[in-house]
Amino acid sequence: MKDMKIGVVGLGRMGANMARRLKDCGYQVSVVFDVAETLTKELAAELGAIPAEKLATVTERADVILTVVTDDAAMLEVFSPDGLLAGAEGRVFVNCATVRPETHELVDELCRAAGASALEACMASSIPQAREGTLYLMTAGDESVFKKLEPMLKDLSKSLRYVGTTGQAAKVKALVNMVMNVNTAALAEGLGLGQALGLDLAMLKEVFSQTGANSRVLETDADDMIDRDHDCYFSAAHAAKDSGIANELAAASGVEVPLSQATEAQYRRLIELGRGELDKSAVAELTFQGRIDE
């Protein structure tokens, strides 16, 4: 695989760090693109890649293209006839964004019609893991495409799963983020109430860790909630989007998810307050007394 040319579209902190990881592993990261021209030029200079001015150049100059975009609209925009699909015959697209399952399904159809292949590679990890090659990757699509790309995907990940046909990985990822976001909102309420009750939060956090209140977000977010350190690893805006995707899936399936709906509402409130680009831990700004009014 390392003789194949790699392109990367979407050079935020996840996409850029995945490109750096692949370069470190000996892959030919030949071309990069972002709508922010400065990001494109800076990463291209760092990696010795071509700074593409248009998406069609990425398809022209790469065999395998990773896309790491923000949402459904961005995903559909890059897979336009004059974008990545221009001259796409024989290319393989690895799509890492958290978007609706039907968006992945549509992109797969568009790629097939253009003579190309697509694979979902949904990520349940954050920025440091992208740089270190320790992502948790859930993939879906044509299994033969997965097998072809497996060596590269293993270099990006610590845990790699193939979960089925196109759209299945997006469904799993939606549920992962649904539960993570509910846990985050619940932790914020517990710590916020603990503060209001005059409890020692260090003690409370330790008790949580030793009882049924323990969770992964307790490890990653509790100190940030207490210290109000909300540097962004996974934004409140993305949390709202992803909870929304899960809630749409629930509604379509006839399943009631009141906790997830309440969680989405909390994150949408942060967006309304102009704090959507803070880390998801900023949901604690809504639950600690006196904070939201500052």
Image (tube, rainbow, N blue to C red):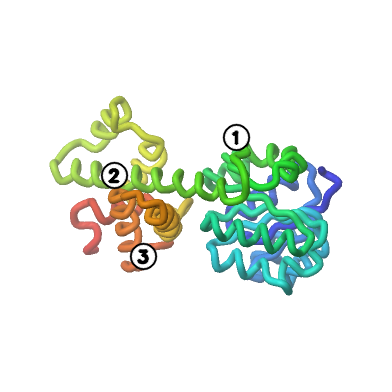
- SS at mark 3? helix
- What's the residue at 44%, 56% (across, down)? 245
Q: How dense is the environment of label 1, judged by Cα within 10 Å: few (below 14), some, or many (20 and up)?
A: some
Mark 3 / mark 1, whichever is N-terminal: 1
Judged from this view, the residue extending furthest toward the bottom is 82
Q: Which residue is mark 1?
A: 159
Q: How many marks?
A: 3
Nearest the camera: 199 or 262? 262
Quadrant in which the N terminus appears: top right
- What's the residue at 53%, 57% (across, down)? 99
- SS at mark 2? helix
Q: Which residue is mark 3?
A: 271
- What's the residue at 19%, 44% (across, down)? 193
Would residue 215 be visible to someone looking at this image? yes
Quadrant in which the C terminus appears: bottom left
Nearest the camera: 33 or 90? 90
Image-based side of 64 in relation to 34, left or right: right
Image-based side of 44 in relation to 10, left or right: right
Q: Which residue is mark 2?
A: 186
- In the rendering, at what x and y percent does residue 73 appear? 55, 68
Residue 173, placed above or below residue 269 = above
Nearest the camera: 71 or 175? 175
- In the rendering, at what x and y percent does residue 10 appear? 63, 61
Q: Given the image, on which type of amino acid does mark 3 rest?
A: Ile
- SS at mark 1? strand
- What's the residue at 70%, 57% (across, down)? 8
Mark 3 / mark 2, whichever is N-terminal: 2
- In the rendering, at what x and y percent does residue 231 appear? 44, 53
Find out whether the residues at labels 3 and 1 contact each other: C-beta distance under 8 Å: no
Q: How dense is the environment of label 3, judged by Cα within 10 Å: few (below 14), some, or many (20 and up)?
A: some
Distance CA(mark 2)–CA(mark 1): 27 Å
Q: How dense is the environment of label 2, judged by Cα within 10 Å: few (below 14), some, or many (20 and up)?
A: some
